């Protein structure tokens, strides 16, 4: 912290009118497992200083991991001179003082730091990595897994008095299984879990679930191209939510590269769709009290009953667009349930027939038009039950049309994901096979 | 660029005896092989948006990675400081892999190379250095490029030009006493534009990326990129989604090399085969595509984004034939997989930075030209699709299913290009697609774009292909 304050004062001394500095430190330990044995270990300690300089209405962003004082001072001197070479832009500024977080003092206010992290040994980490494995199993030809834990600490100050800290631990387990059928065809799948608290990490059965998911892929059959009801598993449903959030991002809107331009306060989605940002839920993965500018997060609707309620505008973009600033980005997104469904089976029972998509294979979308095309894998559904796996299929459409065909939202979002998106169902989606 | 040995030793404040001592510490618990990877990278960037270069910056990344191998098992740690105590701590952390195993098998690589790097064999000489040239010298290029683009089409409402450059000093040493060094430059220019026509909006983008100095920022490059960004925009506005389904696909020369990268390149990376997960795990020596086809992964193309004097394990950059006359002849190896298969490493051990252990990765992957003419391949198709502009791809290694996203192309009807198409994903199966290549044209082109491969870590790559006809792939559509 003293180093950050020294760098801030030094940058001002060298000619910067305004300065923001973020110091980060992270420590990661990882144990990899291959076919029942420890295959790799990794230990990583990272430290970095990020520096945003505002000099004569000019702006530059810099970083270095050489944190000795002499190196940093030389780096800052050069950075100030570099900013002076850029063109002026009066929209560049720090956020107004009243907008920044004042409650992020210890970094642990959100309860995302687990002191059990400090008790872990190399032996314990190996034991946890191996505890979850399913190897050997019938048909299983390769099983790779990883256990990792990390602690991340960031400290941000600016020349207007901002002081904000965020500290969190993270524990993760993930396994990938490859199985072989009687004809020698390979099928693979994965399962994973993560939590800020070790006691909540789903170590048990992680590899078994990956193996089960891989075995379920055996015996795929073709289905004809056509329109089907799309049921999106909660593991991958954020694929159709993220492009909406990106399209509401300030840079996309200001650059006129968004299919949601001029959408604020308009009813562009079905009345049943509500998406909230809940960044301050204690103990929840991904929650933050402030964004990278130090602006305080707050709970707010993003889309409420189908109406767009906010754009994501940082200080710079809001000035460019001559609008009120909001927050830089969505933090902890939650799609609210719809249609009385709690579980995925409730959704399947409701729609009866369709294709359940459990994973994506490539694809992309056009931010300007909202058109998309994705490779998928999953299962044909008849009368609410899985009939057989499908793969080498594609879904194609446009996001506004897709969301207008929303028929159900369950309440089964995985808490380990940064976006809480449950199983979703859409009618009349184009599938190619 | 290959500098003097002492330049690198001085940057990292080490000498060979201290490197030996560090290697000894790394092997103290019984590891069979250890290596050190020192990196000093400086990045620079400038962004032109809304008509002005109003954002830029520099970034420094410095550190050393320590790897210990115990048989095929890897221990890895790194330090962001080259102070002795910090490096020692990393070496001891990496060494834990050996102490965690009941059995330790000695690690061997044939024919250790103790020769010093040869500056005359440098594959990326630097004309105008990025380092030491003031940022202000680069501004006129961005400003002229933007003005040129805007002058070419009055439907343009937004232009973004981004210049990113980096220079990495690398020093490598290992327990076989091989000491190698290299300085790797990379310059990348990306250009994007948003067009408005009535109520319709379209975007286009293009990029160029080379291992070279700032001399790349030429008028010729600006002309080329400005021309490319406006080319085909009328077709983009007119483009429609095709009717989806299986159909023949003609892949245009150049960027269609993404087919090779996704459909087979990843499946040929030897770590996937060593672990038995790749669909090509039992195909070595077998015919996997029609006779006459050669597929190559190449680190020797001068100035190419995938070029390497040495890979990240100190193995010389080289040209590797993966497929010769349609037969699978080589995987892409790092030291671990080469030892596993009892072959020489192919110079494919690569990593994103000192923070990562190396893995088998592609460099510039391409297919050699055939004898057909591109227009004849199109003429063979009665109903299909031609594609030539892409954004991204992906593969499932076990199943071999690959996809790539097509930004633009055309329907082929009765042997002629007709309706423009856009924004569709194409999916296929690697072994089936390779076996289903119906024709290869004589027009190999290596794409100059800023391709980045994201297998666990991000590394710069390149790809290329002549015009190729594939009998059947699944095309997304309505």
Image (spheres, rainbow, N blue to C red):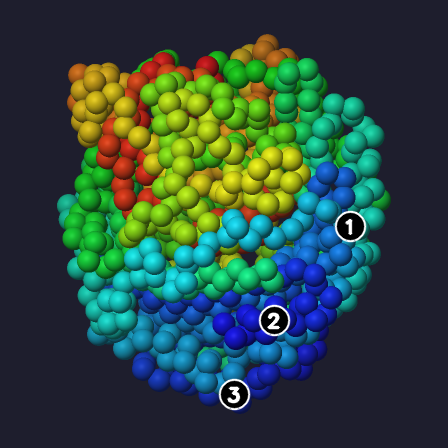
Residue B58 appears left or right of B38: right
- Residue nearer the viewer, A361 or B105: A361
Q: Which residue carries the number 3 mark?
A: B18
Residue at 74% over, 23% down: B155
| Marked residue chain, label 2 | A
Residue at 42% over, 28% down: A303
Tags 3 and 1 in contact by the CB under 8 Å rule?
A: no
Q: Is residue A266 above or below residue B177?
A: above
Spatial CA distance of label 3 from label 1 is 47 Å
| Residue A219 makes an appearance in the image | no
Q: Is mark 1 on a helix, strand or loop?
A: loop
- Residue nearer the viewer, A89 or B469: A89
Image position, residue B473 (x, y; %): 46, 25
Instruction: Residue B251: name its quadrant.
Output: top right
CA neighbours of label 3 inside 10 A, class few (<14), some (14 to 19), many (20+): few
Q: In this view, does B121 lie above or below A380?
A: below
Instruction: Residue A149: name its quadrant.
Output: bottom left
Image position, residue A291 (x, y; %): 48, 50
CA neighbours of label 2 inside 10 A, class few (<14), some (14 to 19), many (20+): many
Tags 3 and 2 in contact by the CB under 8 Å rule?
A: no
Residue at 60% over, 35% down: A323
| Marked residue chain, label 1 | A
Q: Is mark 3 on a helix, strand or loop?
A: helix
Q: Which residue carries the number 1 mark?
A: A87
Tags 2 and 1 in contact by the CB under 8 Å rule?
A: no
Q: Which of marks 2 and 1 is nearer the N terminus?
A: 2
């Amino acid at each position: 912290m003293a180093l950050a304050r020294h760098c801030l004062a030094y940058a001002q001394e060298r000619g910067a009118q305004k300065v923001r500095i973020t110091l980060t430190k992270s420590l990661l330990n990882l144990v990899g497992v291959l076919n029942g044995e420890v295959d790799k270990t990794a230990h990583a300690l990272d430290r970095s200083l990020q520096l945003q300089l505002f000099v004569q209405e000019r702006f530059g962003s810099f970083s270095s991991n050489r944190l000795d004082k002499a190196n940093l001072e030389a780096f800052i001197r050069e950075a100030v001179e570099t900013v002076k070479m850029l063109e002026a832009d009066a929209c560049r500024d720090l956020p107004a003082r009243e907008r920044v977080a004042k409650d992020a003092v210890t970094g642990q206010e959100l309860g995302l730091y687990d002191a059990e992290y400090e008790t872990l040994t190399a032996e314990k980490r190996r034991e946890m990595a191996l505890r979850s494995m399913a190897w050997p199993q019938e048909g299983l030809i390769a099983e790779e897994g990883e256990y990792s834990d990390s602690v991340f600490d960031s400290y941000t100050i600016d020349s207007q008095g901002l002081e904000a800290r965020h500290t969190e631990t993270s524990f993760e387990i993930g396994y990938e299984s490859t199985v072989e059928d009687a004809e020698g065809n390979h099928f693979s799948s994965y399962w994973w879990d993560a939590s800020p608290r070790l006691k909540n990490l789903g170590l048990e059965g992680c590899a078994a679930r990956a193996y089960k998911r891989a075995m379920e892929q055996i015996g795929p059959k073709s289905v004809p191209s056509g329109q089907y009801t799309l049921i999106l598993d909660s593991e991958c449903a954020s694929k159709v939510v993220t492009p909406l959030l990106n399209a509401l991002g300030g840079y996309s809107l200001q650059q006129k590269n968004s299919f949601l331009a001029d959408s604020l306060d308009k009813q562009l989605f079905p009345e049943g769709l509500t998406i909230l940002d809940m960044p301050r839920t204690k103990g929840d993965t991904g929650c933050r009290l402030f964004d990278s500018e130090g602006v305080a997060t707050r709970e707010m609707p993003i889309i409420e009953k189908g109406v767009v309620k906010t754009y994501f505008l940082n200080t710079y973009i809001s000035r460019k667009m001559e609008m009120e600033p909001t927050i830089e980005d969505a933090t902890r997104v939650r799609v609210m349930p719809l249609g009385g469904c709690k579980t995925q089976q409730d959704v399947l029972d409701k729609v009866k027939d369709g294709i359940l998509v459990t994973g994506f294979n490539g694809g992309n979308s056009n931010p300007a038009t909202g058109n998309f095309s994705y490779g998928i894998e999953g299962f044909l559904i008849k009368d609410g039950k899985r009939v057989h796996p499908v793969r080498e299929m594609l879904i194609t459409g446009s996001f506004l049309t897709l969301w207008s065909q929303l028929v159900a939202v369950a309440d089964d979002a995985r808490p380990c994901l940064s976006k809480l998106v449950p199983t979703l169902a859409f009618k009349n989606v184009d599938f190619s096979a | 660029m290959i500098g003097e040995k002492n330049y690198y030793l001085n940057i990292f404040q080490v000498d060979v005896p201290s490197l030996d001592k560090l290697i000894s510490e790394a092997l103290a618990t019984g590891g069979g092989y250890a290596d050190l990877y020192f990196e000093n990278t400086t990045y620079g960037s400038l962004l032109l948006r809304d008509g002005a270069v109003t954002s830029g910056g520099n970034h420094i990344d410095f550190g050393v990675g320590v790897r210990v191998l115990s048989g095929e098992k890897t221990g890895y740690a790194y330090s962001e400081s080259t102070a002795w105590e910090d490096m020692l701590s990393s070496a001891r952390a990496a060494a834990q892999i050996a102490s965690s195993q009941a059995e330790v098998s000695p690690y061997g690589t044939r024919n250790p190379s103790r020769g010093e790097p040869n500056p005359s064999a440098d594959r990326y000489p630097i004309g105008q250095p990025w380092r030491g040239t003031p940022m202000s010298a680069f501004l006129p290029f961005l400003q002229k490029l933007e003005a040129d683009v805007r002058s070419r089409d009055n439907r343009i409402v937004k232009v973004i030009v981004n210049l990113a450059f980096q220079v990495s000093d690398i020093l490598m040493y290992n327990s076989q006493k091989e000491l190698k060094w290299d300085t790797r430059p990379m310059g990348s220019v990306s250009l994007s534009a948003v067009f408005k026509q009535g109520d319709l909006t379209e975007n286009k983008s293009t990029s160029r990326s080379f291992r070279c100095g700032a001399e790349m920022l030429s008028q010729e490059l600006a002309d080329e990129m400005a021309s490319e960004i406006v080319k085909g925009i009328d077709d983009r506005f007119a483009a429609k989604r095709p009717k989806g389904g299986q159909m023949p696909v003609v892949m245009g020369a150049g960027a269609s090399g993404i087919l090779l990268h996704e459909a087979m390149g990843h499946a040929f990376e030897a770590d996937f085969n060593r672990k038995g997960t790749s669909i090509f795990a039992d195909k070595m020596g077998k015919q996997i595509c029609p006779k006459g086809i050669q597929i190559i992964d190449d680190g020797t193309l001068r100035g190419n984004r995938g070029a390497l004097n040495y890979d990240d394990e100190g193995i010389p950059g080289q040209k590797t034939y993966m497929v010769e006359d349609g037969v699978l002849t080589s995987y892409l190896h790092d030291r671990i997989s080469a030892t596993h298969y009892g072959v020489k490493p192919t110079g494919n051990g690569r990593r994103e930075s000192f923070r990562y252990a190396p893995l088998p990765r592609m460099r510039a992957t391409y297919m050699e030209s055939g004898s057909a003419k591109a227009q004849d391949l199109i003429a063979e198709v009665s109903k299909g699709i031609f594609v030539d502009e892409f954004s991204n791809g992906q593969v499932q290694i076990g199943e071999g299913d690959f996809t790539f996203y097509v930004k633009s192309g055309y329907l082929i009807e009765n042997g002629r290009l007709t309706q423009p198409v856009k924004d569709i994903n194409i999916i296929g199966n690697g072994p089936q697609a390779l076996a289903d290549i119906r024709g290869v044209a004589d027009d190999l082109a290596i794409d100059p774009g800023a391709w980045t491969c994201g297998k666990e870590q991000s590394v710069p790559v390149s790809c290329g292909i002549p015009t190729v006809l594939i009998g059947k792939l699944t095309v997304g559509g309505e």
